[in-house]
């Protein structure tokens, strides 16, 4: 039986107290376009998660009654990352234990209060396996889950904002020039470029940052929309 391709995806990223929600459509088998771009900021007497949940509910209602899925980002202040050099004879379960301990120590949290992910680098030395990892507090993930669930949405994935930004600018037609000169509604992304970057980053550090000016752009509202788009692009990997 054939598998129906994913037609729609959402990403949510923050810029200071503000949040950018971007929804993407598969326009053709090779091209992805923006269908929704919303900026939300809490009012003076509004707390973040209930207010953000309301924004998600309203945006979802405009796109149909199905349960929407959204991917969210962690800023550099919210997560830690690094590389461990481990004996090559260890298995993946043992990698996980070592990574969990490393994240726990760096965040100053008990091991059962951290969330983490990792991937091995292509092995170049027989005695050592380099493992790249990223981690955050479990409470951060729990906050995201509670917010999206209360809005009737499902949390699809969470990843460092820098990865989402790299994915988006690599796939965006016109690259950084489009970020600076085009309305978000006019952005279009190449499916093949999303897959090519994913292959390129296998076994490499998290932060390639080949595109000049990307770090600076990530500090702006346009950069938050770019990160949100990159989060949504994950579903077409």
Image (cartoon, helix red, strand yellow):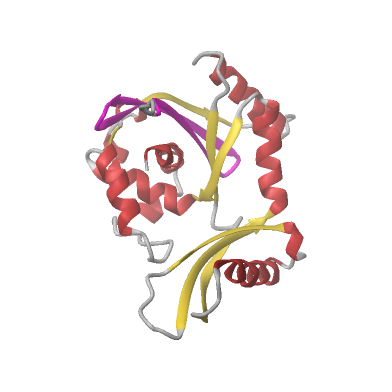
Residue 41 spot, x, y in % from top left: 59, 32
Predominant secondary structure in magenta? strand
Residue furthest out toward the front: 1
| Residue 138, image x, y percentages | 70, 52
Q: 41 or 109, which lies in front?
A: 109
Q: Is residue 13 magenta?
A: yes
Q: Looking at the image, which residue is at 68% across and 33% down?
A: 147
Magenta span contains residue 121: no
In the picture, the quarter occupied by the N terminus is top left
In the foreground, 45 or 9:
9
Q: Residue at x 58, y 22 (%)?
A: 67
- Please indicate whether residue 193 sits to the left or right of residue 233 in the image: left
Query: In which quadrant will I find the C terminus?
Result: top left
From this viewpoint, is residue 41 visible? yes
Q: Is residue 43 visible?
A: no
Please state the extent of the stretch shown in magenta in the rendering: 6-33
């Amino acid at each position: 039986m054939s598998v129906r391709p994913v037609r729609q995806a959402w990403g949510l990223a923050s810029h200071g107290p503000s949040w950018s929600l971007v929804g993407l459509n598969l326009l053709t088998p090779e091209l992805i376009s923006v269908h929704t771009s919303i900026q939300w900021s809490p009012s003076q007497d509004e707390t973040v998660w209930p207010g953000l949940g309301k924004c998600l509910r309203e945006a979802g209602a405009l796109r149909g009654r199905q349960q929407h899925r959204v991917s969210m980002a962690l800023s550099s202040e919210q997560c830690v990352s690094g590389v461990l050099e481990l004996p090559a004879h260890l298995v993946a379960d043992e990698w996980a234990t070592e990574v969990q301990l490393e994240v726990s120590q760096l965040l100053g949290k008990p091991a059962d209060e951290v969330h983490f992910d990792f991937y091995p680098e292509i092995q170049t030395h027989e005695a050592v396996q380099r493992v790249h990892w990223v981690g955050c507090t479990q409470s951060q993930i729990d906050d995201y889950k509670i917010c999206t669930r209360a809005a009737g949405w499902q949390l699809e994935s969470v990843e460092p904002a820098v990865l989402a930004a790299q994915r988006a600018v690599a796939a965006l037609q016109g690259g950084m020039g489009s970020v600076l000169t085009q309305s978000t509604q006019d952005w279009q992304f190449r499916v093949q470029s999303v897959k090519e970057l994913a292959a390129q980053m296998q076994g490499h550090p998290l932060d390639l940052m080949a595109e000049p000016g990307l770090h600076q752009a990530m500090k702006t509202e346009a950069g938050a929309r770019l990160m949100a788009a990159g989060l949504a692009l994950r579903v077409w990997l």
